[in-house]
Image (spheres, grey):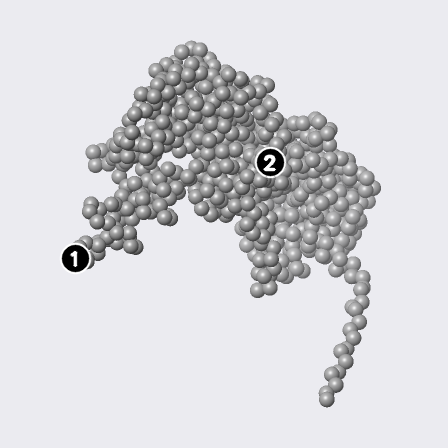
């Protein structure tokens, strides 16, 4: 019997104190992460020195040379020996001073860190001195005594051979062009904020500076000189403030790009108490506004300067001071987001478009909205225009009244009353403040009901979830943290549209129909659609009377519908205009007859609050993202589009057989199939790119959605993640 040797008992490793040089080099690697980090620290020191001119010279992306010169107050001769030691600063003396700090530097780590990863030389002169001094530093200490030299007012700091003793980092920074681009971007941001300071930045050996700005009283001029005319001419001035100690205290001013600005990436320049910082929460909130408000979700240009009481800002949260922590940050972000959204919506009304005129020829058919997104038919032939008999229902066999012919095609023509009263009302409505349009007590009560019934748990899911895809015709799959949810897009879109109607009350843009649609005919279409016995004509007289009564009622209410909801009905009883609830989204026009019938039958016209609530509910149901009326061709609904043969027809797998036993391939209604594919594809695109971004911004889900099946949690990914970690 073998005896297993006893396991050797290992003693725990001894804890020892790191050498000071190792500690300092580790700290330096955190503070000076890139060449641009060194430039930022030096420029901020120059600004703290009350400089009016700052110039930067760079060689090989900053690895070989960074030279920053300013005309500030300089450095005292007696301070030079401790200038580059760690935690030496003139900005504060005790920790409590951080609560009121206004300078950009305060920890005394920047210059010290540079001496541990590069060779630093400082040349400086103070006011009243006859000559300056030059001194070199390494590892935080002077290499020699300061030497007298000729110098111009201010300070010049030169860093050579950056990261010479950090081989791994230096190898990862060989792309000098990329590093130099970051430095140029940094100086550009400083230049448009500190408009009383001149900035320049150029490569070593280059005759022309890549950044060159001069002091100017106009921030817009500074933006024009740095970023160009194409950016400056498409900016909107924006301001926001709050002075409520119980919620937030701040002032914000800046410029944001309007609806005519187009860019491939977001540019956000943010200064908080004159510090160049980043705020991911604010950036994401503003990007959501642009996605939900502007066509094609153009990437914005944003410059903002936020001023808060110094005691409301914690500046000591990041080694490079790139981030700060704000008191009541969520409230501040939400208020700025609301102001930006309001300004953008007003600017979107004056959006301009570049037009290209194409002369039609007999061989080229005109293009309509339906033709733009039709996918090729299965046979490979190009989709043709929808025949007239499928645009407007001509018999009871057509299951849905096609309303596409009424969709407005030319946004520069308006069909409406030209009376002076209407013109005056329109101009007044355009000038109104969005918050002042909901001044009716009933509307404010309905909005307060929405806020009071909001479910905080569902609100977090709506705002923080990620859209994955459609699970079926009604439910979308979402991920929130490590949980998967099924969300009913019909219920969600219906509630979102209802809330949008109330919040944008009397402040809508319009969808113009190309031709006025007679109300009486629309109501008749809806009534026939409700009648299950399509062959019966016994109730035609009753339906006609109902249509006439509802048409008369809506004519009487036309002025109120136009004034508050942008639903325009002309004196002849024709519907010609509908409101826009979400930009980039047009409702299913096949549901217009049902909507008009709902206005006549379901709206409570007698009492104001109930009237507005039922009208908002009717609009919400009409604009909700219901499944298209044509069956989904990607599933079992494909059978609907199969051509039916005269005589015998089999359903044994999709092939029809003749008497002689030969098989014939299935044939489909390709035109109708292509229309269905387009409708379903457009709906899914709208759900992903319009509905969910808008929900994150606007929707406040009511408590009822927690129990009515709108949100269903279907899986938890925690265990799944653990399995993946083991693999």
Q: Secondary structure at mark 2?
A: helix
The C terminus, quarter of image: bottom right
Which residue lies under the disc numbered 1? 660
Residue placed most toward the observer, 55 or 650: 650
In the image, taking residue 499 as reference, residue 452 lies left or right, namely right
Residue at position x 73%, y 28% in the image: 245
Q: Residue furthest bottom?
A: 1
Is 126 drawn above or below residue 567 in the view shown?
A: below
* Cβ atoms at labels 1 and 2 below 8 Å apart: no
Residue placed most toward the observer, 175 or 417: 417
Residue placed most toward the observer, 415 or 160: 415
Tell me, yes or no, if residue 680 can be seen here: yes
In the image, taking residue 223 as reference, residue 277 lies left or right, namely right
Q: Residue furthest left?
A: 660
Q: Residue furthest front?
A: 538
Tell me, yes or no, if residue 463 can be seen here: no
Residue at position x 19%, y 57% in the image: 662
Q: Horizontal and vertical percent for residue 242?
A: 67, 27
Q: Horizontal and vertical percent for residue 716?
A: 58, 52
Q: Horizontal and vertical percent for residue 415?
A: 36, 19
Residue placed most toward the observer, 655 or 360: 655
Specify which label sits upstream in the sequence, 1 or 2.
1
Residue at position x 76%, y 78% in the image: 7
Quadrant assignment, res 628: top left
In the image, taking residue 374 as reference, residue 453 lies left or right, namely right
Which residue lies under the disc numbered 2? 703
């Amino acid at each position: 019997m073998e005896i297993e040797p006893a396991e050797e008992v290992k003693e725990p490793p001894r804890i020892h104190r790191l050498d000071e040089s190792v500690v300092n080099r580790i700290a330096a690697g955190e503070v000076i992460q890139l060449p641009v980090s060194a430039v930022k620290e030096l420029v901020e020191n120059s600004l703290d020195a009350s400089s009016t001119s700052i110039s930067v010279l760079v060689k090989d992306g900053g690895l070989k040379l960074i030279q920053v010169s300013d005309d500030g107050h300089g450095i005292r001769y007696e301070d030079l020996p401790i200038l580059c030691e760690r935690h030496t600063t003139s900005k504060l003396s005790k920790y409590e001073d951080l609560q009121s700090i206004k300078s950009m530097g305060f920890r005394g780590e920047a210059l010290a860190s540079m001496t541990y990863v590069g060779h630093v030389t400082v040349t400086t002169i103070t006011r009243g001195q006859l000559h300056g001094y030059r001194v070199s530093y390494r590892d935080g200490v002077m290499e020699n005594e300061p030497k007298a030299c000729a110098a111009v007012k201010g300070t010049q700091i030169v860093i050579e051979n950056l990261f010479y003793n950090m081989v791994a980092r230096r190898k990862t920074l060989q792309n000098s062009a990329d590093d130099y681009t970051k430095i140029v971007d940094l100086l550009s941001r400083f230049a448009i904020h500190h408009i009383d300071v001149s900035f320049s930045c150029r490569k070593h050996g280059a005759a022309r500076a890549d950044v060159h700005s001069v002091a100017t009283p106009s921030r817009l001029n500074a933006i024009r000189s740095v970023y160009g005319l194409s950016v400056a001419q498409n900016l909107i001035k924006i301001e926001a403030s709050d002075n409520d100690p119980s919620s937030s205290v701040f002032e914000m001013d800046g410029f944001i790009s309007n609806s005519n600005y187009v860019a491939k990436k977001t540019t956000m320049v943010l200064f908080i108490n004159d510090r160049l910082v980043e705020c991911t929460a604010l950036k994401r909130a503003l990007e959501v506004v642009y996605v939900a408000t502007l066509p094609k979700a153009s990437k914005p240009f944003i410059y903002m300067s936020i001023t808060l009481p110094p005691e409301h800002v914690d500046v000591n949260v990041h080694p490079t001071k790139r981030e700060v922590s704000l008191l009541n940050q969520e409230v501040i972000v939400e208020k700025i987001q609301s102001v930006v959204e309001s300004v953008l919506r007003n600017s979107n009304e004056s959006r301009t478009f570049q037009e290209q005129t194409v002369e039609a020829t007999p061989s080229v058919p005109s293009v309509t909205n339906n033709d733009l997104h039709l996918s090729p038919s299965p046979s490979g032939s190009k989709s043709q225009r929808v025949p007239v008999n499928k645009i407007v229902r001509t018999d009871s066999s057509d299951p849905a009244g096609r309303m596409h012919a009424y969709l407005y095609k030319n946004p520069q023509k308006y069909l409406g009353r030209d009376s002076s009263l209407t013109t005056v009302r329109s101009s007044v409505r355009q000038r109104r403040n969005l918050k002042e349009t909901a001044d009716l007590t009933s509307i404010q009560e309905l909005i307060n009901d929405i806020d009071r019934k909001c479910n905080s748990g569902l609100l977090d899911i709506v705002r923080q979830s990620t859209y994955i895809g459609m699970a079926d015709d009604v439910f979308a799959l979402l991920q929130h943290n490590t949980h998967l949810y099924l969300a009913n897009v019909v219920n969600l879109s219906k509630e979102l549209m209802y809330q949008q109607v109330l919040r944008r009350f009397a402040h809508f843009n319009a969808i113009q129909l190309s031709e006025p649609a007679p109300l009486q005919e629309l109501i008749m279409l809806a009534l026939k659609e409700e009648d299950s016995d399509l062959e019966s004509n016994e109730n035609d007289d009753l339906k006609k009377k109902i249509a006439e009564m509802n048409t008369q009622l809506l004519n009487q209410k036309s002025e109120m519908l136009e004034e508050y909801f942008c639903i325009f009905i002309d004196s002849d009883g024709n519907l010609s205009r509908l409101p826009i609830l979400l930009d980039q989204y047009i409702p299913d026009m096949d549901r217009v007859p049902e909507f008009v019938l709902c206005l006549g039958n379901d709206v409570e016209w007698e009492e104001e609050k109930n009237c507005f609530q039922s009208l908002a509910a009717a609009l919400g149901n009409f604009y909700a993202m219901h499944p298209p009326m044509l069956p989904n061709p990607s599933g079992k609904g494909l059978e609907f589009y199969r051509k039916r043969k005269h005589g015998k027809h089999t359903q044994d797998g999709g092939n029809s057989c003749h008497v002689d036993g030969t098989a014939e391939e299935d044939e489909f209604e390709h035109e109708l199939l292509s229309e269905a594919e387009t409708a379903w594809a457009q709906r899914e695109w709208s759900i992903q790119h319009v509905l969910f971004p808008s929900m994150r911004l606007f929707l406040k889900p009511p408590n009822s959605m927690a129990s009515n099946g709108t949100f269903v949690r279907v899986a938890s990914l925690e265990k799944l993640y653990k399995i993946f970690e083991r693999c």
